[in-house]
Amino acid sequence: MTPEELKQILDKHALWLKDDSKGVRANLVGAHLVGAHLEWANLERANLVGANLVGANLERANLEWANLERAHLVGANLVGAILDFSCFPLWCGSFTAKADDRLVLQLFAHIARLDVEACSEEVKELVLKLPELAKNGFCKYQNAVKEAKP
């Protein structure tokens, strides 16, 4: 995908976000975006299933509600990115992605709310320690996390 093609997709996506009768939702399924500069990009609700974002700069990008299933995020910069309600890939393809406090604490908060009754005592103990380890950490970001949209 050329930078010009990507720009066209993102421009149409921006129109679609404003008025879904105009523009087109970004469909970047399997897109090869290695090292792409997408800082501040509005990728809200974008379909990035299996996209190759290795080393991409997604700093402060809006990825709210984005589908990142099977996306390759190795070494991607997610500092300041908004990932609320996104489908974040929990596989090796997200190893070494650069995260900030908000993302790490948000993931901790989700883990801390899992029902771990079926887990081993060792895992239960780890999960029970999370709220204390992240004590009040996530709370300072709660107001920044958006409410679920219908």
Image (spheres, rainbow, N blue to C red):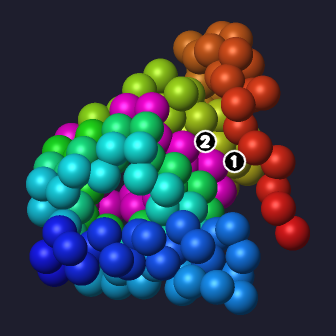
Would residue 41 be seen by someone viewing this image from the given angle?
A: yes
Circle 1 residues within 10 Å: few <14, some 14–19, many ≥20: few
Q: Amino acid at mark 2?
A: Ile
Query: Relative to 89, does residue 110 appear above or below in the rendering?
Result: above
- 95 vs 116, left or right, is left
Q: Which of the two residues, 65 or 133, is positioned nearer the viewer here?
A: 65
Would residue 112 be seen by someone viewing this image from the given angle?
A: no
Q: Quadrant of residue 139?
A: top right
Which region is colored magenta? 78-96
> x, y (%) of residue 88?
47, 58
Q: Quadrant of residue 137?
A: top right
Outermost residue toward the right in this view = 150
Residue that appears at 35% across and 38% down: 59
Q: Quadrant of residue 138?
A: top right
Q: Which residue is mark 2?
A: 111
> x, y (%) of residue 69?
42, 72
Q: Which residue is mark 1?
A: 114
> x, y (%) of residue 104?
48, 31
Q: Amino acid at mark 1?
A: Leu
- 123 vs 39, left or right, is right
